[in-house]
Image (cartoon, rainbow, N blue to C red):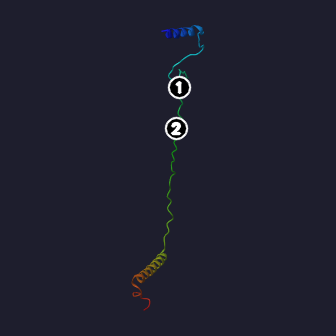
Amino acid sequence: MRKIVSVAALTLGLFVGTPAVQAGGVDLSIGISIPGVVFGGPPVYYVPPPPPPRVVVVPGPTYYVPGAPYYYDEHAYKHAEKRWRKHQERAWKEYHRAYYGDEGDDDDD
């Protein structure tokens, strides 16, 4: 028991002998990270820009101008017909030579 009394006396002496310690200006605060109250101006609204102007392209009028008629006289018709017949005869002979050989050629007789 002597041991308990000596420990109690020593503890009491420490409390009495030391001045009271006081921390000045120290605060303890526990908070949840939320922002404070912020007051702002009214919301700002912007007017949307006007739509671009519509562009309508109207095609100009189309005109058809027929060419001047050209009439062949009788001599010109006969000349054109003669040229066409000679061309057809040459084409027929060339076709005949290409597919049948020289058998049907009447020029050698």
The dot on residue 99 is none
Query: Which mark sits nearer the N-terminus, 1 or 2?
Result: 1
Q: Amino acid at mark 2?
A: Pro
Residue at image point 42% right, 82% down: 98
Front-most of residues 107 and 70: 107
Q: Quadrant of residue 13?
A: top right
Above or below: residue 57 compared with residue 99: above
Q: Position of residue 96 (x, y in %)?
A: 40, 82
The dot on residue 51 is 2
Whole-number angstrom distance, CA of label 1 to CA of label 2 = 24 Å
Q: Position of residue 102 (x, y in %)?
A: 42, 87
Front-most of residues 30 and 54: 30
Front-most of residues 7 and 67: 7
Q: Amino acid at mark 1?
A: Pro
Q: Quadrant of residue 28?
A: top right
Closer mark to the observer between disc 1 and disc 2: 1
Q: Which quadrant would the C terminus be assigned to in this image? A: bottom left
Q: Which residue is mark 1?
A: 43
Helix, strand or loop status at disc 2: loop
